[in-house]
């Protein structure tokens, strides 16, 4: 098949970009022809250097790097960006069989969808977040530091000062979601969920749209090696952006209560606050290889205590692949890979619950068993690029068959 992948960046700087790039590589290695449409100019990951992958830049800029008045208007409807997308598709030597959208909120707008529909192309969107339903994208109240319970675009939602950046951002994003609803009304769209929890939650939030739902695990690019020995670790580890919604502060507080050092790999708004706490070590960002070298050497467990309904944090899967037990938030989609007490613990993102799980790490024999189970269970059904590409190929085939059935019925 000829697949066009649309993402805003071509480097694995975040979860969605990482999945887009690795999906492209996995599909190319499976024999598919891939055109990677990169919305924003910038570097490209070496994974995209493959004979079956062609990369095209749309030469967009980040909406929030534009003057405020232009950013607001572009966020609602960006005609020039849509035109560049259309021209890129029309200029391809071979018409794609399907367009797979991973990102569109940073430099594009709802205007991209009419461009795709007008060309009669099947469109599939991976739901890395909640932007298809929720204006702030995470279905989380930054003002109350709690998951949202409001109906998106309801009067209560419109009044809530919930955005993580500002009222202006909330206003623009609310307008964008209203435009998106209008744009997608009576249009068929296929969406991919990366966890069972996303299927359950987003299915209800998006009931107003004509969607076909599919379930595919994110790819995890980890080479198999001997499992780590977490019993040798001296700390609990957190990997990622240091923010309150991801629960970085909860890790520090719970570790102190459990009497364990806390190691943070990453940076973010909470960095200064964490550095000032006793028993905390913040080492900043590291290369992926250095991250897991450090975790394998230092970590008794990885802690991922998201306060928001995170769809599928990749660090959880990567830790399990390395044989590192995980303490995961029950609100995160990745918790479905945790068997409590077998390869880690799934607990509420609360200090005492996390501290209780950390205290259970003190028994070295049990800890080694947890690590072995983490590795064994992961590698029984690894979330490899090949497995991901095979699952995507199955989804694409079902989408094409469904469209063919509609054509025959017409």
Image (spheres, rainbow, N blue to C red):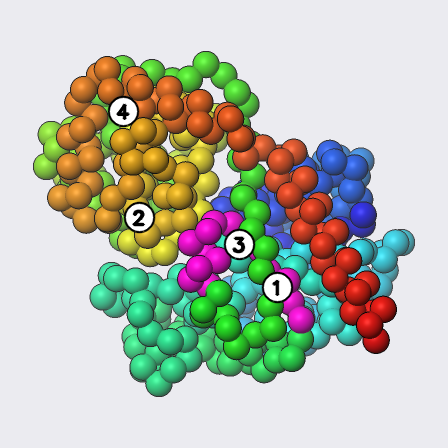
Q: Residue at x 40, y 43 (%)?
A: 336
Dot 4: what SS? Answer: strand
Is residue 44 placed above or below 197 in the rendered structure?
above
The numbered mark, 4 or 1, whose residue comes first in the sequence reads 1
Q: Earlier in the sequence, mark 4 or mark 2?
A: 4
Circle on res. 212 = 1
What element does badge 1 sit on? strand
Residues at marks 3 and 4 touching, judged by CB atoms closer than 8 Å: no
- Marks 2,1: beta carbons within 8 A: no
Residue 408 point in image, percent of width and height: 85, 69
Q: Residue at x 45, y 14 (%)?
A: 226
Q: Which residues are magenta?
A: 188-202
Q: CA distance from mark 2 to mark 1?
A: 26 Å
At which x and y percent is residue 286? 42, 32
Mark 1 closeness class: few <14, some 14–19, many ≥20 residues within 10 Å: few
Structural distance between the alpha carbons of marks 4 and 1: 41 Å
Q: In the rendered image, is residue 287 in sight?
A: no
Crowdedness near tag 2: few (<14), some (14–19) or many (≥20) residues, C-alpha within 10 Å: many
Q: Nearer the viewer, mark 1 or mark 3?
A: 1
- Mark 4 highlights which residue? 300
Q: Which corner quadrant holds the C terminus?
A: bottom right
Instruction: Report which residue position mark 3 lands on.
Output: 193
Q: Residue at x 53, y 54 (%)?
A: 193
Locate residue 201: give its quadrant.
Answer: bottom left
Q: Which residue is mark 2?
A: 330
Callout in the foreground (4, 1): 1
Q: Position of residue 166 (x, y in %)?
A: 35, 71
Q: Is residue 140 left or right of residue 409?
A: left
The residue nearer to you, when weighing 275 against 28, is 28
Tell which circle, 3 or 4, labels the residue nearer the N-terminal end.
3
């Amino acid at each position: 098949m000829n697949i066009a992948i649309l993402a805003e960046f071509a480097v694995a700087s975040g979860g969605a970009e990482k999945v887009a790039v690795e999906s492209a590589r996995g599909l190319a290695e499976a024999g598919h022809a891939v055109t990677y449409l990169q919305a924003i100019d910038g570097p490209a990951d070496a994974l995209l250097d493959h004979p079956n992958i062609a990369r095209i830049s749309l030469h967009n800029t980040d909406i929030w790097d534009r003057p405020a008045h232009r950013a607001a208007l572009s966020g609602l409807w960006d005609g020039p960006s849509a035109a560049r997308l259309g021209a890129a598709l029309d200029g391809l030597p071979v018409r794609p069989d399907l367009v797979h959208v991973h990102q569109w909120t940073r430099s594009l707008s709802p205007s991209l969808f009419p461009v795709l529909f007008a060309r009669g192309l099947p469109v599939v969107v991976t739901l890395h977040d909640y932007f298809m339903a929720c204006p702030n994208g995470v279905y989380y109240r930054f003002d109350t530091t709690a998951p949202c319970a409001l109906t998106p675009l309801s009067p209560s939602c419109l009044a809530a000062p919930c955005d993580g950046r500002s009222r202006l951002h909330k206003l623009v994003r609310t307008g964008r979601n209203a435009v998106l609803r209008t744009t997608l009304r009576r249009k068929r769209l296929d969406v991919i969920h990366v966890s069972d929890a996303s299927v359950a939650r987003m299915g209800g939030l998006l009931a107003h749209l004509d969607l076909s739902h599919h379930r595919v695990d994110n790819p995890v690019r980890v080479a198999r090696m001997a499992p780590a020995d977490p019993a040798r670790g001296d700390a609990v580890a957190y990997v990622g952006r240091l923010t309150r919604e991801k629960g970085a502060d909860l890790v520090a507080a719970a570790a102190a209560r459990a009497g364990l050092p806390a190691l943070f790999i990453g940076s973010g708004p909470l960095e200064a606050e964490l550095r000032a706490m006793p028993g905390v070590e913040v080492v900043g960002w590291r290369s992926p290889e250095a991250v897991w070298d450090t975790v394998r050497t230092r970590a008794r467990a990885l802690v991922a205590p998201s306060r928001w309904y995170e769809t599928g944090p990749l660090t959880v899967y990567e830790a399990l692949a390395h044989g590192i037990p995980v303490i995961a938030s029950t609100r995160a989609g990745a918790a479905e890979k945790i068997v409590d007490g077998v390869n880690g613990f799934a607990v509420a993102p609360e200090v005492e619950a996390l501290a209780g799980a950390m205290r259970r790490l003190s028994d070295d024999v049990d800890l080694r068993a947890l690590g072995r189970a983490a590795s064994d269970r992961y590698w029984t059904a690894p979330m490899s690029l090949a497995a991901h590409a095979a699952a995507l190929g199955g989804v694409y085939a079902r989408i094409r068959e469904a469209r063919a059935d509609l054509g025959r019925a017409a």
